[in-house]
Image (cartoon, helix red, strand yellow):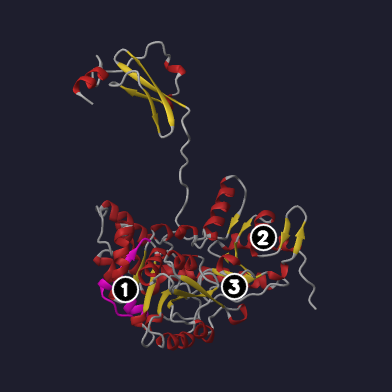
Amino acid sequence: MTAASSSSLLGSSRIGSAPTISGLHSDSLNPTSISFSSNLQGLSLRSSGAKRQLYSRGTGSVVIAQNMDRVEVDLSLSPRVNSVKPSKTVAITDQATALVQAGVPVIRLAAGEPDFDTPAPIAEAGINAIREGHTRYTPNAGTMELRSAICHKLKEENGLSYSPDQIVVSNGAKQSIVQAVLAVCSPGDEVLIPAPYWVSYPEMARMADATPVILPTSISEDFLLDPKLLESKLTEKSRLLILCSPSNPTGSVYPRKLLEEIAEIVARHPRLLVISDEIYEHIIYAPATHTSFASLPGMWDRTLTVNGFSKAFAMTGWRLGYIAGPKHFVSACNKLQSQFTSGASSISQKAAVAALGLGYAGGEAVATMVKAFRERRDFLVKSFGEIDGVKISEPRGAFYLFIDLSSYYGVEVDGFGSVNNSESLCRYLLDKSQVALVPGDAFGDDTCIRISYAASLSTLQAAVERIKKALVTLRPPVPV
């Protein structure tokens, strides 16, 4: 375009002057289809298949869109996201919370969250951290103060020797685990997971483009992994074995002898690493005892130990966990975290130092909570043991009861429909008894349901009465 033609096109309009509209009422124009121009007059434009008529009056112009083609947004998601299932525990907890907020008196026994307040010394440490200005970024792997305290705890309580550069503190143990899976798994690798399992383990494997290999266990064997089954499932693609003891969802605790048998198998497979999820280690009921897998002969080099503060210290909302292991692997987790979230909360880390200072295994504060959990467990085991058709493996740790109610499947209920699996049974119990539980199929065992007894004894008593009444309307099979 020449200078002359440019001048002609611009006419008397001044760049930057306010547009004026003559003969048009602003309330007759759709504001979403109008754009203002101070340097174009008398043009009819066609763009992206849409005709736009331009009107000009005075020193300004208005473009009115006509017959605009609708541009469809690409709503596709990545195959990685599509391969991951949403967490049923989160979904059911959210549903139950919404019902409570709507005024429905639902008893919520789905979430794995202690009902106790964070012990006062821990809370005070967090408050003091704010007051004293500890509100800035920390090193990505965590403060030296906290990582040193974790090293001391692992040495004194677990018999494990680590240096601070072999520890990474994260925003919860869940982040610690998923970063470990992403750090060591390649596409096509296999992650071996005993079932029942925590809902997130298989999905974490899928996020890493690895394949979850589920190893079933039975209630008659207290949901403990059979070493022979493990050995039969190992291949050249086997990269990770995930162990959780005490277990979510079963409460099972692996005895040292069984862990030693598993360790002997692991030692024969050079590629195989172990993630030992020990988040419930302090919530354990004598005579059961906790053994850290990395403390077994030859397993330190193979094991990534995950722990945290949410469960034993009633700090779920503080969001703090950690991983300990060989520097090569832990550094990889640290690198991932630097691009995901960076360091965990500075305030939570100060509180965690106070938690580790409460004494061996959390001292009296944790012992008091564990005593209450045990009383609740004993009540539930006794109560459900009195109901026909219920199978129970008594939990030896954590705060979950994973009971087999499959004898109540196969029933048609008027006004509800069929109860034929763990999910429909949990929906039925939520509908008829207003108790929120988690179906066992979320954990890889459709015969069972999970009950969290991280609730007061009076709440559990009310829940049991409601569940008993609801089960009466179902027709358990007559014993032969």
Between 168 and 12, the one nearer to me in the picture: 12
Residue 344 locus on image (x, y percent)? 32, 59
Between 129 and 136, the one nearer to me in the picture: 136
Instruction: Characterize the local packing of mark 1: few (<14), some (14-19) or many (20 or more) Cα atoms within 10 angstroms.
Output: some
- Number of callouts in the render? 3
Q: Quadrant of residue 121?
A: bottom left
- Element class at badge 1: helix
Determine which residue is flagged by label 3.
378
Determine which residue is flagged by label 2.
424
Q: Start and end of the magenta stretch?
A: 152-171
Query: Height in image: 413 above or below 201?
Result: above
Instruction: Characterize the local packing of mark 3: few (<14), some (14-19) or many (20 or more) Cα atoms within 10 angstroms.
Output: few
Q: Residue at x 23, y 22 (%)?
A: 6
- In primary-sequence order, the first of circles 2 and 3 is 3
Question: Disc 2 residue type?
Answer: Ser
Q: Residue at x 31, y 23 (%)?
A: 37
- In primary-sequence order, the first of circles 1 and 3 is 1
Report how far apart the C-alphas of labels 1 and 3 lie in the structure.
41 Å
Q: Residue at x 47, y 47 (%)?
A: 75
Q: Is residue 16 visible?
A: yes
Report how far apart the C-alphas of labels 2 and 3 lie in the structure.
27 Å
- Element class at badge 2: helix
- Element class at badge 3: helix
Query: Height in image: 263 above or below 396?
Result: below
Report how far apart the C-alphas of labels 1 and 2 lie in the structure.
42 Å
Q: Do callouts 1 and 2 mark residues in contact (Cβ within 8 Å)?
A: no
Question: Disc 3 residue type?
Answer: Asp
- In primary-sequence order, the first of circles 1 and 2 is 1
Determine which residue is flagged by label 1.
329
Residue 239 locus on image (x, y percent)? 41, 77
Instruction: Characterize the local packing of mark 2: few (<14), some (14-19) or many (20 or more) Cα atoms within 10 angstroms.
Output: some
